[in-house]
């Protein structure tokens, strides 16, 4: 059955202003949502990432590696669900049931390939999610960037510490779900490029420190063509 990733994109500054009671209700809502997906046989994987203010973004400019500290913009990847569904439309219907604060966007996209190890959160030490980002003026240009990253960077993964990864289909193959202040939800077609860096894949590595993750990312061929955003898993 096809798999789809539902990426949760939030305004972290706005989320930080929400009363603790609302935050607690949202967390409980996600727990209930995950249980519902599991009972329906749709749940494959899901994780939450620590705030982007704790992360790093590694890229290259004029041949020089560049490391930036977060935040990296108005919205950040808060977490994701990986679902099994018969079709994109069915995946969107499942995504519409996901708890969302006003201003949150869900980016629903089919997987091209890959696999995420479900036991990754049980690893001792630090586990980091690495989002692969590309920036292009057209979807075709973006796909070409992702193809180059795919071809050149795959051999750079530290196999002993690699906890799985996925490549996503182009943004135009997916949908975005938004919610208004009144709770009304709307669905929009892609591609959603808008001159910004767009996620093309996600992988996980198990390393000792954030600095070690940054060193690995700095040596990856991926940064010649795009950027790698490194965020630690949020684990209870």
Image (spheres, helix red, strand yellow):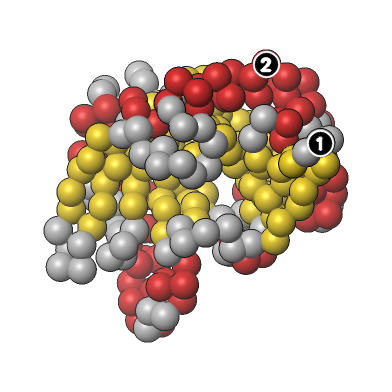
Between 128 and 84, the one nearer to me in the picture: 128
Residue denoted by label 1: 63
Residue at x 21% of width, y 30% of height: 89
> Residue 55 lies in what quarter of the image?
bottom right
Badge number at residue 178: none
Tell me if I can see residue 206 in this picture.
Answer: no
Between 232 and 122, the one nearer to me in the picture: 232
The number of discs equals: 2
Residue at x 23% of width, y 57% of height: 179
In this image, 127 relative to 193: left or right?
right
Between 74 and 83, the one nearer to me in the picture: 74
Closer to the chain start, of discs 1 and 2, is 1
Disc 1 is placed on an element classified as: loop
Residue at x 64% of width, y 62% of height: 70
Q: Residues within 10 Å of mark 1 (few under 14, many from 20)?
A: few
Residue denoted by label 2: 151
Between 203 and 219, the one nearer to me in the picture: 219
Percent position (x, y) of residue 62? 78, 38
């Amino acid at each position: 059955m096809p798999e789809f990733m539902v990426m949760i994109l939030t305004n972290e500054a706005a989320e930080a202003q929400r009363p603790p009671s609302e935050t607690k209700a949202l967390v409980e809502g996600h727990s209930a949502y995950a249980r519902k997906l599991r009972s329906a046989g749709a749940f494959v994987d899901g994780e939450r990432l620590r705030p982007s203010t704790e992360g790093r973004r590694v890229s290259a400019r004029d041949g020089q590696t560049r490391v930036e500290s977060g935040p990296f913009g108005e919205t950040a990847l808060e977490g994701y669900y990986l679902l099994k569904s018969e079709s994109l439309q069915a995946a969107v219907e499942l995504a519409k049931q996901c708890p969302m604060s006003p201003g949150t966007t869900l980016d629903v996209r089919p997987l091209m390939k890959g696999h995420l190890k479900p036991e990754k959160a049980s690893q001792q030490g630090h586990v980091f999610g690495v989002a692969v980002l590309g920036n292009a003026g057209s979807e075709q240009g973006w796909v070409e960037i992702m193809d180059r990253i795919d071809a050149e960077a795959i051999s750079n993964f530290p196999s002993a510490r690699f906890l799985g990864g996925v490549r996503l289909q182009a943004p135009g193959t997916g949908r975005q779900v938004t919610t208004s202040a009144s709770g009304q939800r709307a669905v929009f077609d892609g591609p959603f490029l808008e001159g910004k860096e767009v996620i093309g894949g996600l992988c996980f590595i198990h390393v000792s420190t954030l600095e070690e993750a940054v060193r690995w990312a700095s040596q990856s061929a991926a940064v010649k063509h795009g950027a790698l955003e490194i965020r630690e898993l949020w684990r209870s």
